[in-house]
Every structure is written in structure tokens, then in C-alpha cells.
Amino acid sequence: MIKIKGLNKSFGGLHVLKDVSISVGKRKVVVLIGASGSGKSTLLRCINFLEIKDSGDVILMGKQVDPQKDDLNKIRQNVGMVFQHFNLFPHKTVLENVVEAPIYVKGISRQDAKETAIMLLEKVGLSDKACVYPAQLSGGQKQRVAIARALAMNPQIMLFDEPTSALDPELVGEVLQVMKDLARDGMTMVVVTHEMGFAREVADRVVYMDEGRIVEEGVPQEIFHAPQHVRTHAFLSQVLA
Amino acid sequence: MVIIYEIFMENLSAFMAAMVVTLKLTVVSLVLAMFIGLLIAFFKISGNRLLYSIAQLYITVIRGTPLIVQLMFLYFGIIELVILPAFWAGSLALAIHAGAYIAEIFRGTIQSIDRGQMEAARSLGMSYPLAMRRIIMPQAFKRAIPPLGNQFIIGLKDSSLVAYLGVPEIYGTALYVQAENFNPFQTYLVAGFYYLVLVIIFTFLVNKLENKLNVEENEVKYK
Ligand SMILES: Nc1ncnc2c1ncn2[C@@H]1O[C@H](COP(=O)(O)OP(=O)(O)OP(=O)(O)O)[C@@H](O)[C@H]1O
Ligand SMILES: [Mg+2]
């Protein structure tokens, strides 16, 4: 589904991603972990071209993407993204947030878009909030709406960038539950998170990044119980402590 | 007091007509100024160096010179090129003037919208223009209402300078009336009163609009 080869990305003089290669199979869930500033977000954003790589290959759904030639708007329709700070559209109701892109990007009729949206809101447990504005929602509810909004485009891939990091602890569970359901339904997912419990339970593979490189990757069992690298070990003992 | 009242009553119809002219000048010039301001704001955020430079030059010149100079310069410049009634020449000059300030208001509010909004929109597959139109501008417009309201009030009062082009708006009428009755103090006081009334009405309307928009996002929307 996603194949990345020899990816490099710099911001000015700062070399943020160094020769990163990773592949994510269909219906697989990969969890990215690593210290702050290690390049997790940048890697995720290179997958949907919110950042454009300096060099290397990004192959999505079997097609090599050339950001100069290909229509990135088309590609992004297939790659949903959920952000740490939700980024809901505050001037639109929950329902309007969800139907916006299907109507204005895909050209789906308002009626059909609404039906899908209501179904998705039911799926994330928020059908009763369809007509309120984001300002009236809790963080957990906002994030669930954001997930529904991304799903409304019927993407093949979902990217999550620390979806629970901005939430009060008691609200984390409801968002993780939605993500677990999604994984169970077979969505291909790349998730940056510090929720190691989620990684253990849901991830097919865990990837540890440090200073712009992938240091280690493997099934959760290996990474958590028998990390091969000192750095992975040090990082895990810190976050699991 | 008596004489103020007399001047007020004697010139009631003249000032009422003048008030309409002032309002027309203000509305026409500010609607034009909004278009100019929006265009120039887009030039500034376009990332295109040439467009940015054009916008910057325009804003620098307009903000760096007095309105009355611009008005006269443009008026005598415009009538060299096309025959334009003083009202339209004045409106155009006022629009070009206010446009520079409105451009900065729009640029500021557009840039004040959280980056995450554009990113979320783009991540859903929206093109840049679509994201601007559907997501960024509605929020930027809303944020622009208080400073725009302020700019409108300034524009309303600035329209008085068009009197020097011979347009019979409030101040122009006062100039004429005081030359007839030899009571400049009282006459200008009456003129000031009309401006004050217009500004108060306008402020009230802007506040109402602002409240309405604020309330909306904190309510449940049924449909
Ligand atoms: N747009 C940008 N311009 C300049 N530097 C950037 C930009 N985006 C990220 N960086 C830098 O790149 C490095 C990696 O950032 P990135 O956000 O990918 O890290 P991260 O692993 O997601 O960290 P965190 O856990 O804090 O989110 C950081 O040093 C960051 O300051
Ligand atoms: Mg990050």
C-alpha cells in the first residue's frame, strides 16, 4: 500500500529525514514511535505530500508519485489524515465538517454525502452531535469527528499524527477505541503515538525512529520485549516508566 | 443654543440630502475598497515576488501620503484621462486610499488563521483555491469584521474631504451654509452632529453583526 525508499527531507540546513525506507502492506497497522523531533510527523506528512521529499521514492497503492507531475489533490483524497490538534473547521457544524470534502472535492450530491456522514458519525458514536459546532465538543469528541471527516473521503490509507496527545487522559480511550475498530475493519494505518498499549494491541509492526532514521522495526512483541538497539531500549524504558 | 437650533432647522433638508450623498460616497468607495483590498492581500500572500512588490509599493505610497494629496492628485489625474463626475472620481480616490488599509486587514486576518486549517483542508484533497474559498476566507472575514468596521468609520469621515472636489456631502454643505449665514461655529457643529449620528448607527450595526456571528458558533444549528 505504502512503499517508501531512501527518503530524504531537510528544512533549511536541518536534515530531518535521513534515507528512510519503510513499507506498509494492505490492511496493516504500523505504529511510529520515537523521541520528539525525530521526524515522525515529517515522515507522515511526506506520505500525503503536505511536505515534499527532497529525494527518494514514495509509492502509494503501487504507483510511484511524482509531486511535480501528479495531481496531489487526487492522491490526498485516498490518504486521510488525523492531526494532533484536530483542525476541525470551526465555522462549520459537525455534519458540515464531514460533508465538506465529499461535496466540494468529489462532487457527491449533498443528500448522499449527508447519508454517509450520518453513518460515519454513528460509527464514531456522535450522531447526536451532527448539528453542533466544534466549539461545543470535548477534545475526544472533536477527534472522533476529525476521524469521521477523513473517512468520509473513503480513503485507502489513514495517517494519524499523535491523535490523542492533546487530550485529557480520560478522553484518550474513546479515540483509541475508534481507531481500533478501524484497524479491525481492515484500514491501512500509519499511527504516530505514545500510547504503547495501543501499539501492543493493534500494531502489526512498530517502527522506532531516532534523529531522522529508522533505527529498528519489528512486531510489537520484539520491539517491546527484546529491542535490539540500545537507543530503542533507552527510549522504551523512558516512555514505559 | 437658539441659533444652533435655527441653523439646524433652516438647513434640515440640505443636510439630509448631504447625508445621503455622504452615505453613497462611503458605501461605493468602501465596496470598491474591499475588492482592491482583497486583491492586494492575495498579492501579498501569493508567494510571487512581483505581485508582492506591487502590493507593497501600493501600500507604502498610500500609507505614506496624505489623503487630500491623493485625492487631488487622482482627481486631476483622472479628469485628464476620462471625464468622470466628481462623485465618482472622489469615490474612486477614497477606494484606492482605503484599499491599502483594508488589504493589510485582510492579509493579517488570513495569516492569523491557524495553519492547521489549510493543512486539514489540503489533506482532504482540496485544492489551494478551494481551501481558501471554503475554509480560510470565511474565518478570515469573520475575524476582519471589527477592524473593517473601524476602517469603515474612518472611511465615512474621510469622505468629507471630497467636499473639495465640489461634491455636496455633509462637510461640503457645511462649507456652503456657513459662507451664507456667517455662523461657522454653529454650522460646523451641526455638520459634526450628522457625522456622529451616522457613526453611531454604523457602530451599532457592526456590533450586532459581530454578536450574531459569535453566537452562531456557540449554538446548536438545526436544519
Ligand atoms: N516546517 C518546518 N520548518 C522547519 N523545521 C521543521 C519543520 N517541520 C519540522 N521541522 C523540524 O524537523 C524536525 C523533526 O520534526 P517532526 O515534527 O517531524 O518531529 P516529530 O518526531 O514529529 O516530533 P514530535 O514528537 O515533537 O511531534 C524538528 O527538529 C523540527 O523542528
Ligand atoms: Mg510530531
Image: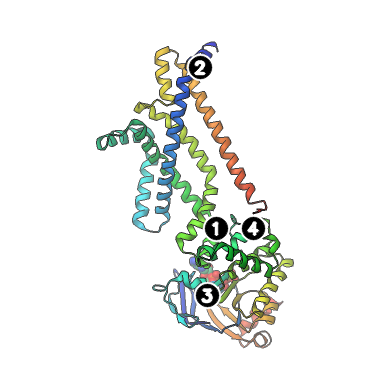
Instruction: State whether residue B208 appears in this view.
Output: yes
- How busy is the neighbourhood of tag 1: few (under 14 within 10 Å), some, or many (20 plus)? few
Mark 3 CB near ligand 1 (8 Å cut): yes
Q: Position of residue B179 (x, y in %)?
A: 39, 15
- Vertical placement of B68 versus B1: above or below? below
Label 2, label 1: how far apart the Cα atoms are: 52 Å
**Considering the image in quadrants, where does the C terminus of chain B appear?**
bottom right
The amino acid type found where label 1 is placed reads Asp
Chain letter of the residue beneath label 2 in the structure image: B
Q: Earlier in the sequence, mark 4 or mark 3?
A: 3
Are discs 4 and 1 located on one and the same chain? no
SS for tag 4? Answer: helix
Instruction: Kindly state the secondary structure of the residue where label 2 is placed.
Output: helix
Label 4 vs label 1, nearer the camera: 4
Query: How far apart are the alpha carbons under marks 4 and 2?
Result: 53 Å
For the residue marked with disc 2, what is the amino acid? Phe
Residue at the disc numbered 2 = B8
In the picture, the quarter occupied by the N terminus of chain B is top right
Look at discs 2 and 3 and give the one toward the viewer: 2
Q: Please name the amino acid that badge 3 sits on.
A: Leu
Label 4 or label 3, whichever lies nearer to me, is 4
In this figure, which residue is indicated by the disc labeled 4?
Answer: A134
Amino acid type of the residue tagged 4 in the rendering? Pro
Q: Residue at x 44, y 33 (%)?
A: B24
Say which chain tag 3 marks: A
- Name the spot of residue A191 as percent of width and height, x first: 61, 75
The residue that label 3 is drawn on is A43
